[in-house]
Image (tube, grey):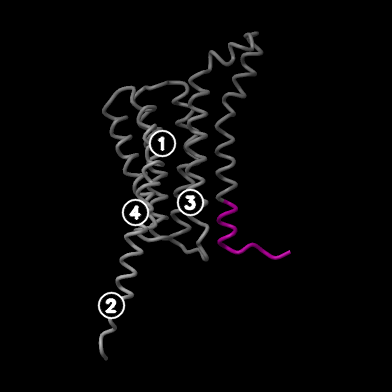
Amino acid sequence: MSALKPLDRLVTFTDAVVAIAITLLVLPLVDAVGESVAARVPPVEVITEHQPQIYSFLLSFAVIARLWIVHRRMFEKVVADSTPLLFWSMAWLLTIVVLPFPTEMIGGYGDEWFTAVFYVGTILASSVCLTVLAFMIHGPVGASGAVTTTAILVVAFVLTALVPGASYFALLLLVFSSLLNRVVEPLLGRVEERRTARQGLRPTPPT
């Protein structure tokens, strides 16, 4: 059995950490079932009394899943690892591992200002790490989607910090970022193709 290459080990480790983090999101709800059974709470009330926790779980599940999909697609063309690549991958994983913590706080405290800022700020930090990785792997044009997402998350963070109760609404901007990326990335790709074509048509200077 051949040993995994360093890059393969990084990708496998990353997938495992993300899988653990996304699983941890549901554990508070599992614990809530045990507490409700001990208190003889009707089954339906387990759902109705924990709606904020359920909403925050579903939201964070979707966020981590989307971030992981971006990371997976980003690494499809990577052929070798490097120290900077390893560093920023670990930084990104840190934000993923931390996310269940503010998720639980959002479920318990609702739209309280600090928890909302902490939650959106963690997602923003994760997007910043992905943006740096995108620049390292694909260059400025290939990183356009990550830049767009991070810019929108900056707006979401500012809205969350300045407008009370705007945290969940601000995160809807993530959906908008996905739609915007589908427009921006093809346009930038065409610009890059035309620039490359023009350079190829330039006459070779005499030697």
Residue 43 location (% of width, % of height):
64, 12
Asked whether the beta carbons under mark 2 and mark 1 sit within 8 Å of each other, the answer is: no
Write down the quadrant of residue 133 in the picture: bottom left
Amino acid type of disc 1?
Val
| Helix, strand or loop at mark 3 | helix
Residue receiving disc 4: 187
How far apart marks 1 and 3 lie (CA) works out to: 26 Å
Q: Quadrant of the C terminus?
A: bottom left
Q: Nearer the viewer, mark 2 or mark 1?
A: 2
| Helix, strand or loop at mark 2 | loop
Residue receiving disc 1: 175
**Residue at the bottom extreme, as displayed:** 207
Asked whether the beta carbons under mark 4 and mark 2 sit within 8 Å of each other, the answer is: no
Query: Which of pointers 4 and 1 lies earlier in the amino acid sequence?
Result: 1
Amino acid type of disc 3?
Met
Residue receiving disc 3: 90
Residue 44 location (% of width, % of height):
61, 11
Q: Residue at horizontal 41%, vertical 36%? A: 175
Stretch in magenta: 1-13
In-front residue for pair 190/37: 190
Amino acid type of disc 2?
Arg
Q: Residue at horizontal 30%, vertical 71%? A: 198
* Mark 4 Cα-neighbour bin, 10 Å: few <14, some 14–19, many ≥20: few
Q: Nearer the viewer, mark 3 or mark 2?
A: 2
Write down the quadrant of residue 164 in the picture: top left
